[in-house]
Image (cartoon, rainbow, N blue to C red):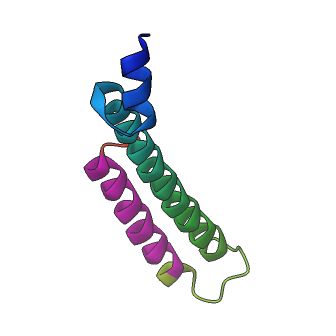
Amino acid sequence: MNLEALVDLMDGKGELAGALANSEQRTARLVDQLRFQHEVLAEIHELSDPKSKTPLQDRDLIRIKAHVALRQAAQSGMLS
């Protein structure tokens, strides 16, 4: 790496700095997507309690939540 490229990188300029910024943005989006998926899984886990008093309603909510999570993952393109 030449000195000029290193200076540009440190100043946030140039091709390498742009690639690094894009990588950081993609990583942040991926972390957000994983947090969302984790939250949905936690909600599904609660709804799947065998002691539930409304198992059919809970089953329908599980299906809806899973559908939304799968659709979101597909639309984002982050996990596929």
Would you place residue 46 above or below residue 27 in this image?
below
Q: Name the residue at 52% across, 79% down.
A: 58
In the image, 18 versus 45, the foreground residue is 18
Q: Name the residue at 71% across, 73% down.
A: 50
Hey, which quadrant is residue 78 in on the image?
top left
Hey, which quadrant is residue 7 in on the image?
top left
Residue 53 in the image: state x and y as whole percent.
64, 89
- Quarter of the picture containing the N terminus is top left
Outermost residue toward the bottom in this view:
53
- Find the magenta span and give its range: 58-76
Residue 79 in the image: state x and y as whole percent.
41, 41
> Does 50 lie within the magenta span?
no
In the image, 26 versus 1, the foreground residue is 1
Q: Name the residue at 36% across, 51% down.
A: 73
Report whether 42 appears left or right of 18: right
Report whether 26 appears left or right of 34: left
> Does 73 lie within the magenta span?
yes
Would you place residue 16 above or below residue 54 in this image?
above
Outermost residue toward the top in this view:
1
Residue 71 in the image: state x and y as whole percent.
31, 56
Would you place residue 28 above or below residue 62 in this image?
above
Q: Name the residue at 37% across, 19% down.
A: 4
Hey, which quadrant is residue 44 in on the image?
bottom right
Residue 32 in the image: state x and y as whole percent.
48, 58
Q: Is residue 80 visible?
A: no
Outermost residue toward the right in this view:
51
Q: How many numbered markers are drawn? A: 0
Q: Is residue 27 visible?
A: yes
